[in-house]
Image: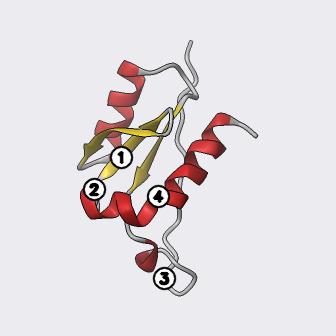
Amino acid sequence: MDVLLKQYLWYLENQDELAKQYYDKVIVIHDFKVYGAFDTSIEALMFGKEHFEPESFIIQVCLPSSETGPDNIVPQKILFWQGQ
């Protein structure tokens, strides 16, 4: 299983606990830890690019599962950058 998917699954497993601390923030996840919380995806992506290797981190809007469940679906995106 690829590292981005593993990190996304880690986020899902810890989503409700993370949302208590990072509600509605865009978080940067690397090595199964949150390294930053930002107001915008651009800020989070720039932080990730500056601190981590390409395709080794994800950014995710942090909401509790009750706000992203089947009755209230929010599209989830895994963003990564391809280094040059």
Which amino acid type corresponds to the residue marked 3 in the rendered image? Asn
Q: Residue furthest top?
A: 84
Which amino acid type corresponds to the residue marked 4 in the rendered image? Asn
Do the numbered discs 1 and 2 sit on residues whose CB atoms are within 8 Å? yes
Pointer 1 residue: 27
Pointer 2 residue: 22
Dot 1 or dot 3: first in sequence order is: 1
Dot 4 or dot 2: first in sequence order is: 4
Distance between the alpha carbons at the discs numbered 4 and 2: 12 Å
How many residues crowd mark 4 within 10 Å: few (<14), some (14–19), many (20+)? Answer: few
Dot 2 or dot 3: first in sequence order is: 2
Question: Label 1's element?
Answer: strand
Distance between the alpha carbons at the discs numbered 4 and 3: 19 Å
Do the numbered discs 4 and 1 sit on residues whose CB atoms are within 8 Å? no
Q: Nearer the viewer, mark 2 or mark 3?
A: 2
Pointer 4 residue: 14
Distance between the alpha carbons at the discs numbered 1 and 2: 8 Å
Do the numbered discs 1 and 3 sit on residues whose CB atoms are within 8 Å? no
Residue 37 at x, y percent in the picture: 27, 44
Residue 9 at x, y percent in the picture: 60, 53
Q: Residue at x 61, y 39 (%)?
A: 4
Pointer 3 residue: 72
Query: If the image is split into quadrants, where does the N terminus sit?
Result: top right
Question: Label 4's element?
Answer: helix
Q: How is the image coloured?
A: secondary structure
Residue 36, above or below 19:
above
Residue 82 in the figure: left or right of residue 43: right
